[in-house]
Amino acid sequence: MTNQIKVPVTALSNMITSVILAASKDATLPTINCVYIEWMKENDAGVLIMTATDRYQLLNAKLAIPAPEGQESVAFLIHFKDLADLVKSLPKVAKYEEEPVVTIGYEPNKITFDWTTGTTFLETYDGEFPKYRTIMQHKSAAAPVISFNVKYLANLAKVKSDTRWRFEFTGAHRPVFAYSTDLDERSVQYIYMFMPIRLT
């Protein structure tokens, strides 16, 4: 059975370029050198999710997509460097009258990215990605005066989103969450979590 989804090239490129900002660059932690990619059916449609973390920051991106073909849910790991190389090879929208669509196909140990003028194959990685959904369950709370690592704010500025960000604080020494636009088929929804530094 074929397991595949279709994603507009701009949304795919923006998701990858943004999410890999949070991937760990520490080669001794191979699982979090990867981006955790999932897609699943939701009602009559689907959602594509990409997540990366280095243990101090976490970036989660979601995109509404047409219902996946094949399995109702798929999840795998791909190294952030492989995804960065993929973005360089994707078609440029300006060269086409209509925006190209990339078909992503899943097979055990191999992911296919296919578009009108090219195909790329990437290997998946073995490993268990952190259970990020439990981290993202939180309640807003008052927080003391805090500061942020400038690297994380710089990463937030690089996320491919043209919407305003909404921040939620969860208390002293607790993660800060930044939320972008609502989920739809044209815009990628981002959640960026990072750890603050307590000042007082």
Image (cartoon, grey):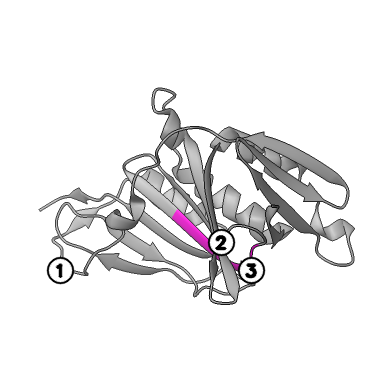
Alpha-carbon neighbours of circle 1 within 10 Å: few (<14), some, or many (≥20)?
Answer: few
Provide residue 84's location: percent of width, then percent of height: 63, 39
Q: Amino acid at mark 2?
A: Glu
Q: Is residue 13 above or below residue 35?
A: below
Q: Residue at x 48, y 32 (%)?
A: 126
Residue holding disc 1? 142
Provide residue 39's location: percent of width, then percent of height: 55, 58
Which span is picked out in magenta? 60-68
Decide which of tag 1 and tag 2 comes sooner along the chain: 2
Question: With 167 as the anchor, is 83 left or right in this view?
Answer: right
Provide residue 110's location: percent of width, then percent of height: 65, 37
The disc at residue 88 is: none
Alpha-carbon neighbours of circle 3 within 10 Å: few (<14), some, or many (≥20)?
Answer: many
Q: Amino acid at mark 3?
A: Ala
Q: Is residue 162 above or below residue 31?
A: below
Gap in angstroms between the C-alphas marked 3 and 2: 9 Å
Q: CB of mark 1 within 8 Å of CB of mark 2?
A: no
| Magenta span includes 191 | no
Nearest to the eye among marks 3 and 2: give it.
2
Decide which of tag 3 and tag 2 comes sooner along the chain: 3
Decide which of tag 1 and tag 3 comes sooner along the chain: 3
Q: Amino acid at mark 1?
A: Ala
Residue holding disc 3? 67
